Image: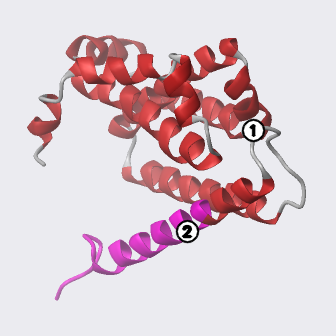
Amino acid sequence: MPAEGWRQWPLALTVAFCVAGLIPVTARLFEASMQTHLLLQMPLLAFCGGYWVYRSEQLQTWLERADPSGGVALVLSSGLMIYWMLPLNMDLATFDPGVRVLKILTVPLMGASVTWSWRRLGPVVRGVMLMEGWAILARLGWILLISPVQLCSNYLIDDQQRTGSLLLGLALIGALLAAVWGLFGPFRKTD
């Protein structure tokens, strides 16, 4: 889809999705299993924040004045990602309404920060961000898969191990895509 096609996506749907995370019925649907919580709701919320940065001209103008290099946004997104990677915080978000609201507010902020910093940083830092994202998937997947104890009290150990397997699978797919891109992408020399 061309870049202009994304700008036509209604902003109301984005707001509706973020609000749906606060409604107890839809929040319980997203938080019913660790897979839907970690691999569906969290990325969709981050996408909402990134989409707002992409779509809003006023927000881009403000961010251009506040953080022209994207470094502050990179540090902010890293801190938020570390916070939400901890199983205790994911656990709290399933039954504490205050932490659920915090999740609905901070995960889109994390997506917005990643989007803003991605647009501002050079190719080397982007490569480091991609490799660290891959490493996070692999580490978290490995921890969830091999842990003999339940890390989240709201999810059974079988659910935890399935989520770990899915995260490791995503890390493997990411590594294969990076290898294919490195071999056949724009860095390949032609004589």
- Residue 14 in the image: state x and y as whole percent: 31, 24
- Disc 2 target residue: 169
Residue at 35% in and 35% down: 120
User: Can residue 69 be seen here?
Assistant: no
**Does the magenta-highlighted stretch encompass residue 172?**
yes
Disc ID at residue 139: none
* Image position of 110 (left or right of 79): left
Q: Quadrant of residue 158?
A: bottom right
- Residue 64 in the image: state x and y as whole percent: 32, 18
Number of numbered markers: 2
- Disc 1 target residue: 86
Magenta-tinted stretch: 166-191
Residue farthest along the bottom direction in this orientation: 191
- Residue 176 in the image: state x and y as whole percent: 45, 75
Q: Quadrant of residue 69?
A: top left
Q: Residues within 10 Å of mark 2 (few under 14, many from 20)?
A: some
Q: Amino acid at mark 2?
A: Gly
Q: Amino acid at mark 1?
A: Leu
Instruction: Give the vertical position of 141 relative to 151 (above or below).
Output: below
Q: Quadrant of residue 153?
A: top right
Instruction: Give the vertical position of 148 relative to 79 (above or below).
Output: below
User: Can residue 80 be seen here?
Assistant: yes
Residue at 37% in and 74% down: 182
**Does the magenta-highlighted stretch encompass residue 173?**
yes
Examine the residues drawn in magenta and state their main secondary structure.
helix
Which quarter shows the C terminus?
bottom left
* Image position of 121 (left or right of 81): left
- Residue 73 in the image: state x and y as whole percent: 49, 27
